Image: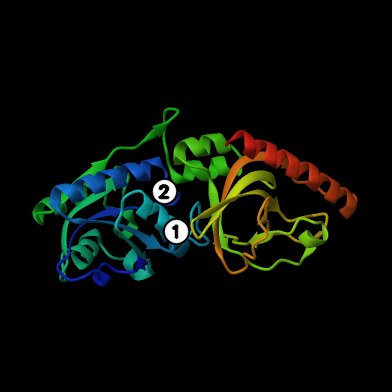
Amino acid sequence: MILHSLNELPAHTRIVVALGVFDGVHKGHQAILSRLVQLAREMEAVPVALFFSPHPREVLCPPGPKHLTILNYKSSLLLQYGAEQVVAMDFTKEIANMSATDFLEMHFASGDLDVSGFCVGENWRFGKGNNAGVDFLAQWGTQHGKRVEVVPFVEYEGEPISSTRLRSLVEKAELAKVREMLGRNFAVSGIVSHGNGVGKKLDCATANIVDEMHVLPPSGVYAGLAHWDGRAEAGIVYVGTAPTVRPDATVPWVELHLLDCNENLYGKELVVDFVQFIRKDRKFASQEELAKQIKLDLAECRRILDMGR
């Protein structure tokens, strides 16, 4: 369950809080969550991960960055990596204009909760104009009897892992590097929506996930895995505008075809892993030519996923 305020927690609960944007929940974020869990054990407190929703840059300089993880998937990852409660605090222009002191006093020093400590990354900034950082938080924590743990960057190939760096690598289809920095496959998530039925005509029915704010790898075909309701199924994933059958489309989306499952997925929330790139997208001379290529793609997808077992 995703909370939207610390006040939704039971009164007088002792908590320690990890603060961050957490887009991607990459290995740097995971290090923060690991320290959060340790601190919670030391202080006999509940570990809470708190982030702003929407992303602050969506409010301050729209449209903001594209997402590596959208709300529900991000929250499930935060719980997976150690948080026991997740708070997606509404970010507004009023919060953006609050001083660092006012923000801390309002949310962490008042009410019936016992906020005993914080875990943050070394580049965490907050307050109006982002003018306060970890030194300010540590000083405030000392004044109010709250521990502040600052977690150093986690590096990959000599540079800090960051959400910005990951977005760039996803858009370049450097999925092996992304996998190293996430500790898992890159994935997109969303509610399955109805398409226009073209996939069925091509004997390759697809589940469609459309989210213009999700960062996507380059248009093309990928071997993948779909997760829902505790299940995992192999599938082939298409990213693009389908120029052969939808020549006027401009916004890319994700289509998933499950290899060995015919279950109706409409309305379900899926997490779709990108395992390996197969080929670039292109426009075919006819739907018949496209259908032939799809058969080749399906065979290659099976080969890749069988090798990974």
Q: Return the x and y of residue 227 as percentages of the image width and height.
A: 54, 54
Which label belongs to residue 179?
none
Give the residue at x 83% y 54%.
244
Which label belongs to residue 25?
2
Circle 2 packing at 10 Å, graded few (<14), some (14-19), many (20+), is many
Toward the top, the furthest residue is: 158
Residue type marked 1: Arg
Per the model, the C-alpha gap separating discs 1 and 2 is 18 Å
Which label belongs to residue 57?
1
109 vs 20: above or below: below
- Observer-nearest of 137 and 248: 248
Give the residue at x 28% y 65%.
98
- Observer-nearest of 173 and 263: 263
Residue type marked 2: Val
Residue 300 seen anywhere in this rendered image of the structure = yes
Q: Quadrant of the N terminus?
A: bottom left
Q: Return the x and y of residue 76 as percentages of the image width and height.
A: 41, 57
Disc nearer the start of the sequence (1/2): 2
Judged by depth in the image, the label closer to the viewer, 1 or 2, is 2
Q: Return the x and y of residue 12 as percentages of the image width and height.
A: 14, 68
Residue 278 seen anywhere in this rendered image of the structure = no
- Observer-nearest of 156 and 40: 40
Horizontal placement of 246 versus 22: left or right? right
**Element carrying mark 1:** helix
Give the residue at x 41% y 60%.
56
Horizontal placement of 144 versus 170: left or right? left
